[in-house]
Amino acid sequence: MTASHSTRAPRIRSAVGARHGLAVVALVGAFALVTVGSLAPPPVSDVAAAGPNAQSYRPAGAQKLVIPERAQVVTVARDGYTATAGVQSLAAGGTNYDWAKLVLLKAGFPMTDSNVTVMTRWMRQENGADDWWNRNNPLNNGWGSGGNSGLGSYDSLELAAENAAEALHSVGGYSAIVAGFAASAPTEVIESAIWASPWASSHYANGGHWAYTAVQVVTSPDGTWAG
């Protein structure tokens, strides 16, 4: 009885050990499946699966924008850009129109057509058009030129423009001229102010000695601008 019991006991332990081993294997296998599932890449979307030949893809709940026919097109206006000529560019041009603009620039007046027209006409009345640069003093300005009655001269046309601008702002009798140029008033308004001022003792015969034809463009000789 004892012998048979001792013979069967190992078999019982073996069977129990085998069942225990199978349970461990099953548990490890289940854990492996869970781990592999968590590391697997996400499923490929329908768009990717469809490939480059897919016509469209509209997921559920997609929104659609509808523009009513009565919607109006709004045009946005952009600011324009302008450039103002500087001393170097005007000197490079070298014409009577460039000098007229330089006086306006030095005096802080706008370079409008009205202002340039009056200034070139004024220069023509003083020195003529063909030699408007005479003595580097296109307006026969006595301010800083060293000559009486405006018969002095300047070292350069640029210096002449500076003195003309300074004279206009410094003499009270020229205030109406300054106001006209500053406002870019009509030509007749500025010209009337010039005639009434003490700039010329003849007062240009109150306009009787004033020409209104277009002033021709004339370039001054080399060396007249710088100095």
Image (cartoon, grey):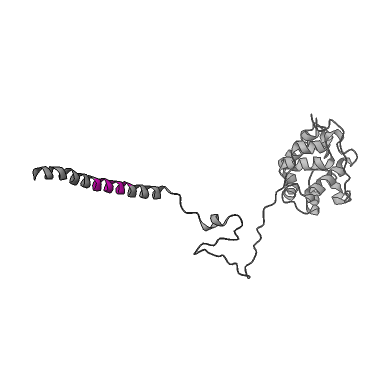
Q: Position of residue 4 (x, y in %)?
A: 12, 45
Q: Is residue 203 magenta?
A: no
Magenta span: predominant SS is helix
Toward which corner of the image does residue 148 lie, by quadrant? top right
Which residue sits furthest left?
Answer: 1
Asked if residue 142 shows in the view, the reply is: no
Q: Is residue 19 magenta?
A: yes
Instruction: Name the residue located 56 percent from the left edge and 57 percent from the top edge.
Output: 50
Please indicate whether residue 31 sits to the left or right of residue 203 in the image: left
Q: Position of residue 67 (x, y in %)?
A: 60, 67
Instruction: Name the residue located 78 percent from the left edge and 35 percent from the top edge.
Output: 158
Q: Position of residue 27 (x, y in %)?
A: 30, 48
Q: Nearer the viewer, residue 25 or 139?
A: 25
Check the picture and name the quadrant holding the C terminus. top right
Instruction: Name the residue located 54 percent from the left edge and 54 percent from the top edge.
Output: 48
Check the picture and name the quadrant holding the N terminus. top left
Residue extent of the magenta highlight: 18-28
Q: Position of residue 166 (x, y in %)?
A: 73, 38
Asked if residue 89 shows in the view, the reply is: yes
Q: Nearer the viewer, residue 181 or 13?
A: 13
Please indicate whether residue 181 sits to the left or right of residue 206 in the image: left
* Count of residue discs: 0
